[in-house]
Image (cartoon, coloured by chain):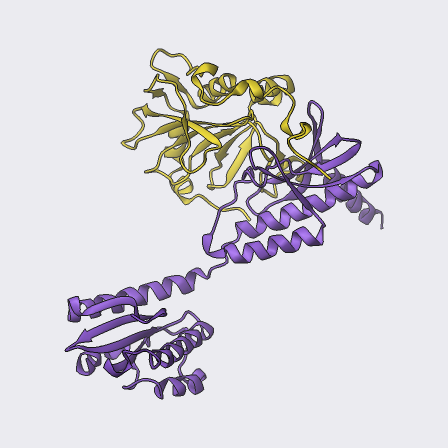
Chain colours: A yellow, B purple
């Protein structure tokens, strides 16, 4: 099963522009709020200033509390319902479902970017930085590194040409826990 | 024969190479070769705790790392599928301090681990796929919704404030009629019948029969003037003749012959 995103398929040129053309993150107030309906996640978002089309674009960063998992997204609601370009630091590998790709290469592990191909199919890929295991590990552990990578990949910056920097003390969540022993080794969880 | 061997080897190699792994700080992630309907590969984690090997999903399913959609109307069905998979593969559950659920199996024998990975993967695959499927019949929902709206609008145009839509009689709350029209202090109960297949059409007929029967038990029964059914005869997805025995039973419950939607003016004669 592979669902087609018809908005992308029908306007692939616009999709490519939304992904590749110059975009400016307006907000510099980098503080997180708890994601609606899901207290386990914290979310930061900013409007984007751009000349691509008349639609509004949002730049979204989400962090899962107590873990190193985070995601970065570009969302243009008037163009298509779901975010049109994403970065996942952690989580399941994605299957690039295509007969042209050898089976053993259809699995793309995280961290990876999620985009769409010409036919509107969801595809995951790693750019050169993510292909390096050492860089990949550093990105998984460092939100700011991942955000900067995403900004480069999508031509998105702050007005002063810099990347947004999330300071740990600005976060409501406690990222200092992340590198300590994972919670499933502690006595707080019991396995028979 | 040589060719066949070649094909077999290729398949085995591809399947084998599709299974990948990541060594983390003190545990292993196996990225299995099982992928879900929404194109995610199932990951299973292995670590050692208190001298036992734990094979677990690490809470990924509960925390929706697999990004499954949630169709509220399918909840009961999904619960059944999930509990079936849980018991079939003898999967256990435990919770961390944040109430995240971990699904797992454990062993003290290193030779059993592969089998446990297989079980946990199958459990996850089946359950996650159940979440990915939209069980409701979209064609049916759409047709019912369109017909309901058309009839509602027609009745609203003609009866305005006199009408209550999807309403029960006050003392039989669990029996709702598509419309109740109160005119000169008398009640007219109206049901709609349509269907994207013979099966759904018959369901609607049966529902009308039962609802009219139950209305007879209401203390307002003597205020009921009409029991009327409107049938969507503009649909080609069912035929009244094929379900005539049920249709006939409905005829015995209504106060007027069912009204075909193509002759909707008759409603105004009856009410």
Residue B224 visible at all: no
Quadrant assignment for the C terminus of chain B: bottom left
User: Could you tell me which residue is drawn at 44 percent across and 43 percent down?
Assistant: A5
| Between A168 and A71, the one nearer to me in the picture | A168
Q: Is the residue B28 above or below the residue B208 in the image?
A: above
Q: Which quadrant of the figure has residue B262?
A: bottom left
In this image, B160 relative to A84: left or right?
A: left
The mark tally for this picture is 0
Q: Is the residue B136 above or below the residue A177 in the image?
A: below
User: Could you tell me which residue is drawn at 26 percent across and 69 percent down?
Assistant: B151
Residue B82 percent location from the top left of the image: 61, 52
User: Could you tell me which residue is drawn at 45 percent across and 22 percent down?
Assistant: A172
Q: Is the residue B49 above or below the residue B61 in the image?
A: above
Residue A95 percent location from the top left of the image: 59, 39
Residue B33 percent location from the top left of the image: 68, 41
In this image, A42 relative to A108: left or right?
A: left
In this image, A164 relative to B41: left or right?
A: left
Q: Is the residue A138 above or below the residue B79 in the image?
A: above
Residue B34 visible at all: yes
Q: Which quadrant of the figure has residue B181?
A: bottom left
User: Could you tell me which residue is drawn at 40 percent across and 86 percent down?
Assistant: B249
Residue B222 percent location from the top left of the image: 26, 83
């Amino acid at each position: 099963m592979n669902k087609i995103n018809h908005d992308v398929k029908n306007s692939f040129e616009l999709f490519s522009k939304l992904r590749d053309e110059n975009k400016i993150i307006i907000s510099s107030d980098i503080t997180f709020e708890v994601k609606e309906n899901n207290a386990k996640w914290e979310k930061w978002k900013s409007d984007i200033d751009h000349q691509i089309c008349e639609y509004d674009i949002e730049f979204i960063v989400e962090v899962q509390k107590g873990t190193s998992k985070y995601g970065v997204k570009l969302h243009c609601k008037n163009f298509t319902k779901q975010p049109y370009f994403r970065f996942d630091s952690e989580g399941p590998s994605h299957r690039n479902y295509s007969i042209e790709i050898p089976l053993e290469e259809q699995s793309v592990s995280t961290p990876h970017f999620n985009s769409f191909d010409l036919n509107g199919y969801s595809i995951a890929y790693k750019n050169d930085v993510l292909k390096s295991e050492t860089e990949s590990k550093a990105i998984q552990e460092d939100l700011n590194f991942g955000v900067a990578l995403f900004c480069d990949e999508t031509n998105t910056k702050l007005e002063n040409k810099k990347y947004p920097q999330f300071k740990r003390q600005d976060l409501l969540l406690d990222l200092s826990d992340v590198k300590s022993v994972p919670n499933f080794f502690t006595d707080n969880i019991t396995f028979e | 024969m040589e060719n066949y061997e070649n094909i077999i080897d290729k398949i085995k190699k591809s399947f084998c190479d599709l299974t990948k792994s990541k060594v983390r700080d003190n545990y292993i992630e196996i990225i299995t070769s099982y992928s879900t309907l929404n194109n995610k590969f199932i990951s299973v984690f292995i670590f050692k705790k208190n001298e036992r090997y734990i094979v677990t999903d690490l809470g990924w399913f509960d925390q929706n790392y697999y990004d499954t959609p949630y169709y509220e109307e399918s909840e009961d069905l999904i619960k059944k599928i999930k509990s079936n998979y849980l018991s079939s593969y003898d999967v256990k559950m435990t919770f961390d301090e944040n109430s995240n659920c971990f699904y797992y199996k454990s062993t003290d024998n290193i030779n059993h681990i592969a089998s446990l990975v297989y079980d946990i993967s199958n459990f996850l695959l089946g359950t996650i796929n159940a979440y990915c499927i939209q069980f409701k019949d979209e064609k049916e929902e759409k047709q019912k919704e369109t017909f309901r709206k058309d009839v509602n609008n027609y009745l609203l145009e003609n009866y305005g404030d006199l009408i209550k839509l999807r309403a029960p009689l006050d003392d039989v709350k669990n029996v709702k009629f598509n419309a109740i029209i109160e005119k000169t202090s008398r009640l007219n109960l109206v049901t709609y019948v349509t269907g994207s297949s013979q099966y759904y059409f018959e369901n609607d007929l049966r529902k009308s029969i039962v609802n009219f029967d139950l209305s007879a038990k209401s203390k307002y029964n003597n205020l009921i003037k009409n029991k009327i059914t409107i049938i969507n005869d503009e649909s080609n997805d069912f035929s009244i003749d094929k379900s005539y025995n049920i249709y006939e039973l409905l005829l015995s419950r209504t106060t007027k012959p069912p009204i075909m939607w193509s002759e909707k003016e008759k409603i105004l004669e009856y009410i």
